[in-house]
Amino acid sequence: MTSTLTPARKRSALTKGQLPKFAPYVVLAVALVLGAAILALIGFNAFGWGIVSAILFAAGLVGWSAAVEGSRKAKDKLATCLVVGSFLVALLPLISVIWTVLVNGIPGIITPGFLGTSMNGVTGVYDNRAAEGGGPVLGGIYHALLGTVQITLLATVISVPVGLLTAIYLVEYGNDRPLARAITFFVDVMTGIPSIVAGLFAAAFFFAVVGPGTKTGAVAAVALSVLMIPVVVRSSEEMLKIVPNELREAAYALGVRKWRTILKVVIPTAISGIASGVTLAIARVIGETAPILVTAGFATSINNNVFGGWMASLPTFIYTQILNPTSPSNPDPSSQRAWGAALVLIILVMLLNLGARLIARVFAPKTGR
Amino acid sequence: MTTTSLTSSRGAGRAGDKVFSGATLAAGCLILAVLFGVALFLVIQAIPAFTAPAADIQGGKGFFAYIWPIVVGTLIAAIIALVIATPIAIGVALFISHYAPRKLASGLGYVVDLLAAIPSVIYGAWGAAFLAKEIAPAYDWLATNMGWLPIFHGPASATGKTILTAGIVLSVMVLPIITSLSREIFLQTPKLHEEAALALGATRWEMIKMAVLPFARPGIISAVMLGLGRALGETMAVALVLSSGALTASLIQSGNQTIAAEIALNFPEASGLKVSTLIAAGLVLFVITLAVNMVARWIISRHKEFSGAN
C-alpha cells in the first residue's frame, strides 16, 4: 500500500539531501558491470573482478554521497565500506586455506591404507614408481596419528590437574594476595611464550637431567604442557569466577567444609565451562609443530612407548614430508601425503572446537525451573 | 563474608582442608617454578655458546655476529605482519562489535576465531604451496615499478618465497588475536557515551571516532603488542615459507631469517656447540617476547583500574 503512495508524497525538509534507499544496490550493480568490463580489457579473473568492483563500489557510493549528502555522511559511508571490506578481506585467507587443504588433501585421504599404515619401509623407490604411474602411493599417517594422540594425552594428563588446581587457588584461596597476583601475571606472560622456546625448554631440561640428545614423546608432552597450562588456568579461572557466591555461602551455612564445597558445589557448577576450556586447550596444542620438532625427533615407524624412542606426530609429519620429501626427485607423493595429513589435522582441530561448544551447551548447569 | 571463621572451626575434615589448599598452592607455585625453570635451563644450556671461542660459532665471528642478523630478520617479519594485520583487525573488530546485525555478531566472531584454530603448520604449507606462487607476479611488478625503493629492490624471487610472503602469512595468524582482544574492548565502551554522541547528531563513524576509539586506545595497543609477541615467536609459517639466506634489505628477494625458523630448521640435526648456540638463540627470543608481553600486560593492568576492562 505505502509504495503506491510514495510518488505522491512530498519530500520533507528533514529527508532532503539523502541518498535513496536503493542507492547501494544501484552502485553495486554498476560497479560489478564496470569491474567486469575493465577486467575483460586486461584479462579476466574472479579475484581481480572482486577487488576492482569493491573499489569502484566504495568510490561510487562515497562520491555520490559526498555530492548529495555532504562530507560528513560521505566519511561515514567510507568508514562503513572500509570496515565491511576489512571483514571480507579477513575471510579470504580462511576460505583459501580450507579450500587448498580440501582440494589437495582429498586425494591423499582416499588412498587405501592412508589412515592404517605407517611410513615404515616406504622409501623413495616406491614414490618414484608411484610418480611414474607404476603403482599406488604407499605409506600413511597411522604412526603420526598414534604419536599425536599419545603426546597430547600425556600433555593433558599433566596440564589439567596443575592448571585446574592453580585456578582454584587463584579464585578460592588467593584473595588478591601478592602470590596470587604474581601467579596471575606470570600465567599471562606464559601465554606469550613462543612455542619453539617451550620446546627448547623441555629439550634443555631433559638434556640436563636425563642426558644429551634425549628425544621422546614424553619430552614433547612436557613442552606442550608448558603451552597448555596457562590456557587451562585462564579458562578455568574465568569459569570458577562466575559461579555465584550464594552457592558457596549456602554450602558454608550448612556446615560444609571449604574443600568439600569446592569439590561438590563449585566445580560441578562450572564443569561444563572447564571441560570446554580444556577441549579448546587440547585443540590449541594438538597442532603445535615447533615444540615437537625439537623434542620428539622424526620417526617413520609405529612407536607405542611415550617414554622411549623417537615419535612422529601429525604436524611434524606434514612438516618433514614437505621440507624433506621421501623421494627428493619426485616430491609429489610426499606432498600428497602431507596434504592428506593436513586435512586429517584440520578435521581433528575443528571437531575439538565443535566438541568444546557442544560440551559447554549440553553440560551447562540447569538454571532455575 | 565470614568464610574464614567457618573454615577454621574444629572437627573432622580439617586435614582435608589443609591438604586441598596445600595442593592448590603447590600447583600455583609449580607454574612460577616452571617459568623460572624455562629461563634457568635455557641459560644453563646456552652458556657454552657465550663462552666458546668466536671461531667455533657458526659463521666464525662469535655469537653476537651470528645472532643479530636473525634478530633483525625476526623484527622485519613481525613488523610486516603487524602493519598488515592491525588495520584489518581493528576493522573486523569494529564490524563485529558495531556494524554487524546483533544476531549475526557472535557467529561472525566464531568465524574469525576459526582462523586462530587452524594449526600453524597448515598456514605454512598454504603459504608455501599456494600464496607464494600466486603472489610472485606481484613481486615482479613491484620490482620493475617500485624498484627504486630499497625494500622492493629487484630481481624479485621467482618462487615468491620471501620475507614479505612470510610476513603476510604471519599477519593472517596474528589477525584473530588482535581482533578478539579489540572486540572485547570495543564492546566495553560505555553505552551512555555512544548514545550521547548519536543523540548530538553524530554519524556512526563520528560516534566511533569520538567515543569508542579513545576509550579503546590502550586496549588496542596492548592487543597489538600481544600480536607482536605471537608474530615474533611464530615458527612454522616462516620455516616453510621463507627460503632463508643472509640479511638483505629487499623484502621481495629470498634471504633473511628469523630466530624461530633458524632453530626449527637446524635443531633436529644439531649436536654439541651448535645445540648450545641454538638454545642461546632461543633464549634471546624468549627475552624479547617476554619483554613485549610484560609491557602489553602492564598496559592492560594500568587500564583496568579506571575502566573495568581486562
Image (cartoon, coloured by chain):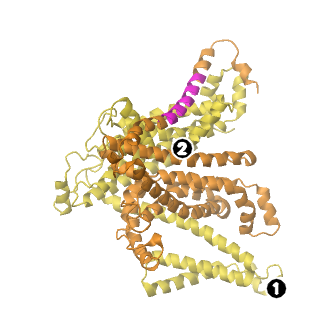
Q: Nearer the viewer, residue B201 or A267?
A: B201
Most distant residue in the top direction: B11
Q: Are marks 2 and 1 in contact (CB under 8 Å)?
A: no
Chain identity of mark 2: A
The residue at which mark 1 appears reads as: A10
Q: Quadrant of residue A83?
A: bottom right
Query: In this figure, which residue is indicated by the disc labeled 2?
Result: A191
In the displayed structure, does residue A298 sit left or right of residue B222?
left
Query: Where does residue B159 sit, x and y in percent of width and height?
Result: 35, 68
Task: Name the colour assigned to chain A in the rendering.
Answer: yellow
Q: In the figure, the orange chain has which letter? A: B
Give the number of the mark in front: 2 or 1.
Answer: 2
Q: Position of residue B278 (x, y in %)?
A: 38, 45
Residue at 47%, 46% in the rendered image:
B284
Disc 1 element: loop
Q: Is residue A101 visible?
A: no
Q: Quadrant of residue B4?
A: top right
* Chain of the residue that carries numbered disc 1 in the rendered image: A
Provide the residue span drawn in magenta.
B21-37
Residue visible at 49% across and 45% down? B286
Identified by mark 1, the residue type is: Lys
Q: Is B27 covered by the magenta stretch?
A: yes
In the image, residue B103 above or below residue B34? below
Q: Is residue B24 above or below residue A28?
A: above
Question: Is residue B163 visible to us here?
Answer: yes
Q: Position of residue A138 (x, y in %)?
A: 22, 53
* Residue type, label 2: Thr
